[in-house]
Image (cartoon, rainbow, N blue to C red):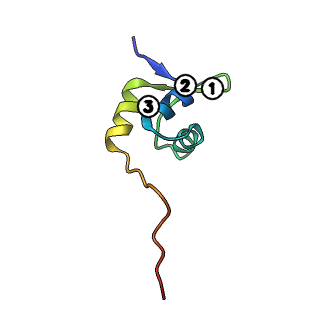
Amino acid sequence: MSKYFTTEEAATYLGVTASRVRQYIAEERLRSEKYGRDHMIKESDLAGFAMTAKKKRGRPATTKK
């Protein structure tokens, strides 16, 4: 039996906000199953995403002219 995470639990697991997890789902970078209005993410999908996802941190570098 697989364990499922809510978007809030997945956010804690990944170290990001819940809105960022929803953005990953909308971009189809993270698989989820929808139950009612909630997205549930399988533990194996979440672990795989955490290992392979490229996370951009902070603001992009600015170039000076």
Query: Residue 64: where, in percent of width, then height?
Result: 47, 84
Query: Where residue 6 is drawn, which disc sits there?
Result: 2
Instruction: Identify which residue is drawn at 47% across, 58% down.
Output: 58
> Please, what is the three-letter code of the amino acid marked with disc 1?
Asp
Q: What is the CA distance from the residue labelled 1 to the residue labelled 3?
A: 17 Å
Quadrant of the image containing the N terminus:
top left
Instruction: Work out whether mark 1 precedes mark 3 in sequence or the reverse, and give the earlier one.
Output: 3
Find disc 1 in the rendering and name its residue: 38
Q: Spot the residue most to the right.
A: 37
Position of residue 60 measured from the top left corner of the image (x, y, whole percent): 48, 66
Distance from the alpha carbon under mark 2 to that under mark 1: 7 Å
At numbered mark 3, what does the secondary structure look like: helix, strand or loop? helix
Q: Is residue 47 above or below residue 3?
A: below
Q: Is residue 58 left or right of residue 1?
A: right
From the top left corner, tell me how far across and down residue 27 is, in percent.
53, 47
Query: Do tag 1 and tag 3 residues touch (Cβ < 8 Å)?
Result: no
Report which residue position mark 3 lands on: 13
At label 2, the amino acid type is Thr
In the depicted view, which residue is nearer to us: 19 or 64? 64
Q: Mark 2 or mark 1: name the one nearer the start of the chain.
A: 2
Q: Cα distance, mark 3 to mark 2?
A: 10 Å
Q: Residue at x 53, y 39 (%)?
A: 21
